[in-house]
Image: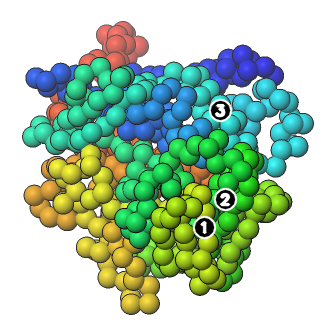
Amino acid sequence: MSIEALNARVQTDLSYLAFGGADWVRPLSHPEGHVYDVIIIGGGQSGLGTAFGLLRERISNILVIDENSEGLEGPWETYARMVTLRTPKHLTSIDLGIPSLTFRSWWEAQFGAKSWENINKIPRGDWMNYLRWYRKVLNLPVMNEVKLKLVEPLAEGVHCLHIDGPGAPSKKLLARKVILATGIQGGGEWHVPSFISEKLPRQLYAHTSKAIDFEQLKGKKVAILGGGASAFDNANFALSEGVAEAHVFIRRKEMPRINPIRQMEVSGMIERYHSLSDADKYAAMAHFFKHNQPPTNDTFERASSWPGFNLHLGAPWLDVEATDEGAMVTTPQGTFIFDFLIISTGLLTDPALRPELKLVEQHIARWEDHYQAPEELANPVLDAHPYLSPGFSFISRDHEGKKSLHGLFAFNYSALISCGISASALSGMKFSIPKLVSAVADQLFLDDRDEVLSSFFNYDEVEFVADLSKEQIIK
């Protein structure tokens, strides 16, 4: 099958499902301009899948905005440096149960069924190409180079989104519902330990989420702090770009070997996580954080196969210092000098770290407001996560914040403790997107409850028009 034939099959499949039917949501007028029923912040895989889910629910007055240029949404061709996705290739995600929309269908349309059997994992660049195709074949309403600056709640159940960027049609957009589909970093910020950021000039280090000029590092020595998969992705990428030595430093004395996500994918835990008690959710995610994710075997093999690769176990960084030779790193194993440091220390999650939420974040409930973990499990990193509904909506910690937060949804990594990995991992999206879409649709419906019921009770359009005056009718 060619890609053209696949495109036609997608349209046929959707027509069989009556996709594109008339909206049921009542339009809302506002003196300041058009009001979208839903605006999705982020045009990556989460945002695109959510947009398709809403359209399937006959909610089409929507818009997706993304701060990046078209085709560069998400991490895949910006800061992601893995060779392949870590997710098993057979897991489906944003196709939402439509076989012709799966990555496998897209792959086989171009490379054939045998090629699918021959690949082990999905190449990173091909996943991005699939997302570009997905957006195009579904004709999703995405506006690029538009950055959300601030969410301002208005009195009428509308949120005013202050925006800027080359693609922004105006300074403001209005929406009844706002979905923050902003990925891993969207619930907080990438984290660089203060003993690094406060002591070193920026030319000596960068977080893995930032652009790095590897051309300038050819033939030089770099150090990578962190033991997760991203650290080894960056080590392999740096060495493949001509870096002479890449040293990975891990504070643990042993490499993590268990990946909890693999168990979650087959045990029902991803799809049924929402049914757990708060105590079980907290314990599960404390366990998840304890184990973290090891690098995939192929990623480690690629990185460690380079002669310039070095792994330091039981080697936390105790101090760093700028010198004439570069960055000096002190560990329990001794002191090292590097030309550049790559920081792979993950992120911190807290709504207070998000500038677009500064008008409402003080009202957002955190886990620490709802659950006090036992001492052996308590973790301030987990406690700072927002406490969300099963449908990913923010919950207010006080009465005065209820109206301001109504209509705001966090479909990003900050949902981890409340909703599991379903909003941040591809393996969970086929379960999480329907939950999110259903919650948004329910809110829109209930917001208009009075009008909906009034229309129902007053409905008097005649449907049965048979003539009951005929002689054979006995009265």
Compare marks 1 and 2 and give the one earlier in the sequence: 2
Residue picked out by circle 1: 337
Read off the residue under disc 2: 221
Q: Secondary structure at mark 3?
A: helix
Q: Secondary structure at mark 2?
A: strand
Mark 2 or mark 3: which is in front?
2
Which element type, helix, strand or loop, lies under badge 1? strand
Question: On the picture, is 154 further left or further right than 57?
Answer: left
Q: Earlier in the sequence, mark 1 or mark 3?
A: 3
Q: Quadrant of the C terminus?
A: top left
What residue is rendered at 49% in x and 71% in y?
320
Residue where numbered disc 3 is placed: 130
Report the number of discs: 3
Closer to viewer: mark 1 or mark 3: 1
| Mark 2 neighbour density, 10 Å: few (under 14) some (14–19) many (20 or more) | many
Q: Amino acid at mark 3?
A: Tyr
Image side of residue 453 versus residue 373, left or right: left
Q: Which residue in the rendered view is the most extreme toward the front?
A: 324
Q: Position of residue 138 (x, y in %)?
A: 55, 24
CA gap, disc 1 and disc 3: 42 Å
